[in-house]
Image (cartoon, coloured by chain):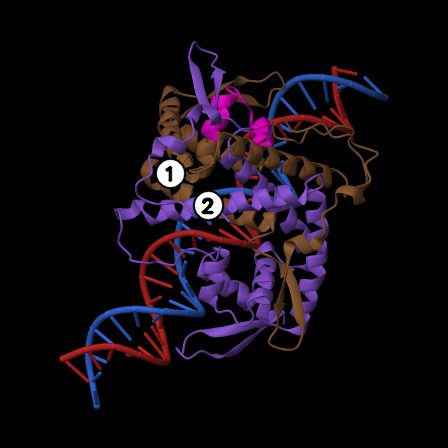
Chain colours: A brown, B purple, C blue, D red
Amino acid sequence: MPDQKDLEPRRSQETDLPDELFLVTMEDDDQAARSTLSFSRSPTVLLTFAANRFGRAASRIYQERYGVGVMDWRMLVMLTREPGATVTLSSETIGIDKAAVSRCLQRLHEKGLVSQGPVHANGRSRGWSLTEKGHALHATILAEALERQRHLFAGFSPEEIATLCGMLTRFLENLSALQAKPPEEIKAPATSQEPTP
Amino acid sequence: MPDQKDLEPRRSQETDLPDELFLVTMEDDDQAARSTLSFSRSPTVLLTFAANRFGRAASRIYQERYGVGVMDWRMLVMLTREPGATVTLSSETIGIDKAAVSRCLQRLHEKGLVSQGPVHANGRSRGWSLTEKGHALHATILAEALERQRHLFAGFSPEEIATLCGMLTRFLENLSALQAKPPEEIKAPATSQEPTP
DNA sequence: TGCGATATGTTGTCTTGTCAACATCAATAT
DNA sequence: ATATTGATGTTGACAAGACAACATATCGCA
């Protein structure tokens, strides 16, 4: 669904956006006119803001109603999606430090929500899966999450949802591309750092 | 620009989105087929993921190059936009706890980036402004932020940017509406908890 | 005049995620 | 066969933000 983009021979001038799109100019109390990011026109500002508020609200709700945090919820989704996933796979997929994933799994294990499979061939990693209790909790929270989502996107058409997802996906691709370069031009041939788009 | 939405007598069926839009069904190792959130089609998942990765990358860059965190950067933008802002106004505007704002300002003050104005009429709050050093740092980081933003939205047209911002704004409005209700129907007459959309 | 209510900021404590260091097992090379 | 290397997970220390409790100054009202 994201359009194919030819990688190399694209004139960056052609599609680059003018900075003024994102800026506002304020009259300082002194004489100077200062420019800075517009809150309403900078996607990154809105993105950060929206994710912060959404995550905080979700965290509070899940915590007080089911005793799990957003991290736990993400792992429930992850393990529903990829039963038998390892710490590393989960960490890369949901984009959170493996230490946090490891601790999260221990927490969920103590609660009897996940079960660890046999040690993998490499002798170190092991797959994790949801227990029946875990599946039940997942289903419960999922219903609530969908209900919330329904309200949060009230007034959006399915086409708009698809457009939004497409844009966010493109944004993530650009982010991956940006992070792949700066360190030292190019090093890793094909680091599959992307989540699972 | 977001369309006026009449609050009460709207049939929720009419614009509600089908849950299937956001779901995937996985074949469990057992016999059961479990549904969960699709990573690629759930805007909230993508939103959280994008904001996490973007924020972390930005944090690392700002920290190592200029010795300030994302929180500090947000306050630099805030004070450029609203010179003389108080702790409470900043907290509400950027949607972060006032305690964090208070500590952030102390930090920036120690670094000589902000200066506190006279105590307000209420005897407790005081306006904060950027020093020349603060303005200089803001300008430096702004240039870098714009450069990053240019890469992150490579391939986006100005119309697409506007569409994205509009959707995120609508999402935030829905979020505010959702948080205004659930506690106990309606209690506070007009809590202006909204940032400044 | 004085007492309580309200607003605002600060401080304490907790949770959570990150970074860095470490431990452990298999595979590989010598 | 043994030592080295690489991959993976775990642990510890730290930073950041959230929430709640507290401090303090002004204002309203009796």
The amino acid on which the numbered mark 1 sits, given as a three-letter code, is Tyr
- Check disc 2: other Cα within 10 Å, few if <14, some if 14-19, many if 20+: few
Q: Secondary structure at mark 2?
A: loop
Identify which residue, A133 or C27, lies in the foreground.
Answer: A133
The answer to which quarter of the image holds residue D9 is: top right
Residue A97 is situated, as x and y percent measured from the top left of the image, at 58, 38
Residue beneath disc 1: A62
Residue A184 seen in the current view: no
Instruction: Report the magenta stretch's main SS.
Output: helix
Would residue A7 be found to the left or right of residue B49 on screen? right
Q: What residue is at 43 percent from the left and 30 percent from the top?
A: B17
**What residue span does the magenta drawing correspond to?**
A75-94
Distance of label 1 from label 2 (alpha carbons): 31 Å
Residue D18 is situated, as x and y percent measured from the top left of the image, at 43, 51
Would residue B51 be found to the left or right of residue B5 on screen? right
**Magenta span contains residue A39:** no
Query: Is A136 drawn above or below residue A44 in the view shown?
Result: above
**Same-chain status of marks 1 and 2:** no
Q: Chain of mark 1?
A: A
Q: Nearer the viewer, mark 1 or mark 2?
A: 2
Would residue A195 be found to the left or right of residue A9 on screen? left
Identify which residue, B92 or C14, lies in the foreground.
Answer: B92
Residue A165 seen in the current view: yes
Identify which residue, A120 or A182, lies in the foreground.
Answer: A182
**Magenta span contains residue A84:** yes
Instruction: Please give the label number shown on residue B3.
Output: 2
